[in-house]
Image (tube, grey):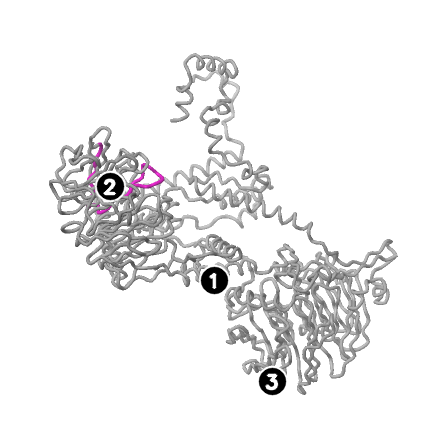
Amino acid sequence: MNSLFAKADAIKPLKKRRKTDRDDNRQKPSGSKESLHDLTLTSVARNTGLPKSLRPTSPPPEGTHAYSHVKDKKLRTQLTRESAQAAWAKRLVKDAELLLSEEKGLMEVEGAMEKTWRVGQDDITTSAGQEAARGRKEWRLDGGPYRSRYTRNGRHLAIVGKSGHVATFDWQTGTMHAELQLKETCRDITFLHDHSHFAVAQKKYVYIYDRDGVELHCLKSHIEPTRLEFLPYHWLLVSVGNPGYLKYQDTSTGSLVVEHRTKLGACTTMTQNQHNAVIHLGHQNGTVTLWTPNLPHPAVRLLAHLGPVAGVSVDGSTGGRYMATSGKDGVVKIWDCRNWNGAVRTWNARGGSAELEWSQRGALAVGTGGSVNVYVKPAIQTPFAGTVLPPLYMTHPVPHRPLTSVRFCPFQDILTIGHNDGLSSILVPGAGEPNFDSSEADPFENKRARREREVKGLLDKIQPDMISLDPEFVGSLAPEPKLTTAINDTHDIPFARLPRMERLRVIGKADETEDADEQDVADDGIGGKSKPMTKAEKEKKKMRGKNKSLKRYLRKQRKNVVDPTAVAVRERLARQRDERERAKAVSKGEGAPKSAALDRFKKR
Amino acid sequence: MVKISVLQHAPAQHLPVRPGDPTPRSRNLDPLMHPFSRARERTRALNAAKMERIFAKPFIAALEGHIDAVECMARQPGTLDMVASGSWDGGLIVHDIVKKTQQMRIDVAHKGKITGLAFADSSRLLSCGVDRNVKLWDFREVDENGAGPSEPRKPVSVFPGKTAFNSIDHHRTDPLFATASNIVQIWDETKNAAISNLTFPTASETVSAVRFNLSESSVLASIGSDRSFTLYDIRTGKAERRVIMQMRSNALSWSPTFPTTVLLASEDHNLYTFDIRALTNPTQIYKAHVSAVMSCDWSPTGTQFVSGGWDRTVRIWNEGRGTAPEVYHTKRMQRVMSTMFTADARFVLSGSDDGNVRIWKARAHEKLGILDSRERAALEYRERLKEKWKTDAAVSKVSRSRHIPKPVYKAAELKRTMLDAQRVKEERRRKHTRAGESKPKAERKTVVVTEQT
């Protein structure tokens, strides 16, 4: 209405109005740019427009959906705004990478004749900085082969010897937290949420100690445990043992969440996928199984090796996409967790069963026989048919067989090897992530920050039944139910009580754009310009029994009764037949009837 | 020549410079550094929703003083504190709701019940009752000469009428007021008799409420016992339009921000918003009460409104959302006869059959008092989380569910059963009639019976 008034220019004196009218006519005879001179708009814009400080300074970023097919205006605006914001956020995250200040370690050679694996630990320590060189250590300890475990921030180290020597310490400052002689077989150790508690898999049960080594709990439901894992975001302590039971214990409430019978005998190999909290177990018969608390059977069962499985590890640097397994026979395999059909890469590691571990930046340490070999990323994950060793990045001989554990230190270029005579730490340039996030794991956190993080972590605890192979299912749309209540597209339920999607479908307003897109893509891929099928193929792909039930329905209808449904069905069938024949004619090139020479004399 | 560099952190960058300084925090926004970020955010949203329900303590205070049911309330325009309430026994109290004290109290202002209250200006108050009088009161403690109130208080002036009055409302700017009896009358404050009588030509009904429009201040609307809703204009002095509905309305309120929107509280347990440009059907039906809705009032922002019902509950609705309102109740609150938003839209007042005026928070979980910046940031983050995850089943269930008294719950259940049965019956009937003979009618189309001009 206002714009109408403004066009009439009712407010201005008569003389002036005429003049502007003529001016307007002269300026734009086409009248296409009318909106630019909308007087109401210009007068109102001064008071109603967004202030300059709030106006968007640049056009909406690329990747913003238009949602033009959505009819509801409010919804459309909201969706568009959300997608623009998401695109902005994505771009800003890219910008934020500039703020990552710390530099990663690396080892580079110049010519093709030089090899990184020829560089020994002495060269690396001499060329490393004073602080970094302290990571190279040798601990000579009695008490059998040792295993070790770092906290998530890489500050504290827990070690356990086979014959019961347990110690936890801050390896950077060298302060010992606890040292225990348990005088019984200890098979594994793990920190819980941080260094204030740790769990040890002892001869009969799992025990939990606090930082000072005081025994807090004896978990009698975990019998003869061999391996321990802790899922930090779910606060679950997972153990597997000689009886072959996989047990999840909630360390925040103390309850045993679930126990799974693997039915595959004693198990000595376990690891977790840090990105979806799925537990990977390696078994005596060569299978690797993936477990979640909410499934009573493995989520994935994979025959990985012909002998027993000796080591499993999951690559965190690719979001848990790759898994490495090793067998007692010395074969190392890399698997793609999204496609279990065959290993990505296979090679034979000399020296029998191998201990495996991926670092944060995707270096794979393989500890076999008397040496530890480190392989780096693009080579080991590219599919390769032969069983050839991938290019070696680094190697380090350890003369104390057997090697029982290899562990990378988070946020450091350090690899700790547990062996018969203690532990040795070596430097692996480029293994650790240089930039940590204080809200997740901070190597420099103080007491208050640790307490704060403990409380926050408890508040954010994820429920155990949320663990699944795809962690992104949270907050995504549930798949649409395939079942409909429609029988031959007619509903017995009245329209008003149908579910919303079906109602929309009946009116023809259901938004099925995505489905349509997929169909288009499929059509482009299969149909279109692909070569025609051979006769055998045609015979193989021929649709059989199509519409059988419909035809039977028609057959059963008595001919002398005019039933509207039957009539409709008959019409539909006839129409389909017509379309088929027309399509056939077009494909044969008989689309338009050929004109004969004398057709031009035909009467029309 | 091999180039070797080994990662080492500079502790100086990550440790506080002096003891007592905050520890520097470093950030890495790589999604691989933040596993389960979505699942953790959902947990946070769920906790936020639960915390909202834990801290939902809406009741603030009950203002006592009336002997019988509180029939009507009015707030003084332009102030936050003055609220007048009148009761069935003829008592009239002006409350200071900030100090929770009584500014003025008259035990027998009218003979019989007080049916309407309206503030005339910053110092005077109009009241009307079934004793066929409109009285004008000065409620100040001391007047401009410094003299205290006469003891007992006397009205400044009395406007006698012919029949019992049911409602009164004052013009926004002019010294005019409108009363509702069997007709709508316009009065001048300075004259002793009504200056004009407004009535729809064919109507003979008892008008139960009359309200001036807040923006288009010469337009007024009334509701009556004929199940009618009528629009008048005092410039033409005529009834412009009239609508007859299925059930009669009990209360009426104009939207303060949308001049064309009017809210009706109906006897059929529903509230309706109408756009007065198209009175054929309501723009929205608000369903949750399980008994007649007795009163309603818009928030000054125009985005919310409050309603009180015969079912002993107070409900706070969002404009345009017809279900799942916030619901307030206490054990001792009886039938709610009058409700009102305060002028800052943060509080809600309800006057009930038990003679109390109760003060509630408009947002049940709001923390009153001063917030420090960290607390405010945490609150805003929680609000945003709830908004983002409101479609999640667990989160929405927590924030949706309300405890309501057992009688109300049972009544709602019974009502649902009855409506379902009706609907099923209608469907069956339609199924067994000839196709296309009886078409289902949208509920919005059935509210209005006729429109008269």
Where, by quadrant of the figure, is residue A185 drawn?
bottom right
Q: Is residue B153 magenta?
A: no
Residue B319, horizontal then vertical, whole percent: 35, 46
Instruction: Reply above or below: A168 against A540.
Output: below
Q: Position of residue A520 (x, y in %)?
A: 53, 42
Residues drawn in magenta? B240-262
Of the residues under marks 2 and 1, which one precedes in the sequence? 1
Task: Identify the amino acid type marked 3.
Answer: Lys
Q: Position of residue A160 (x, y in %)?
A: 69, 79
- The reply to whether the C-beta atoms of the residues labelled 2 and 1 are less than 8 Å apart is no
Numbered badge on residue A204 = 3
Residue for point 30% across, 57% down = B358
Quarter of the figure with the N terminus of chain A? top left
Nearest the eye: A278 or B114:
B114
Regarding residue A558, the answer to whether it shows in the image is no
Q: How far is the residue under mark 2 from the one under mark 1?
A: 46 Å
Labels 1 and 3 in the same subunit: no
* Image quadrant in which you'd find residue A341: bottom right
The mark tally for this picture is 3
Name the secondary structure under disc 2. strand
Q: Which mark is residue B169?
A: 2
Amino acid type for the residue under numbered disc 2: Asp
Q: Is residue B123 above or below residue B375?
A: above
Q: Chain of mark 1?
A: B
Residue B50 visible in the shown view: yes
Q: Residue furthest left?
A: B162
Give the residue at mark 1.
B47
Q: Is residue A122 left or right of residue A413?
A: right
Residue name at image x 64 percent, y 61 percent: B22
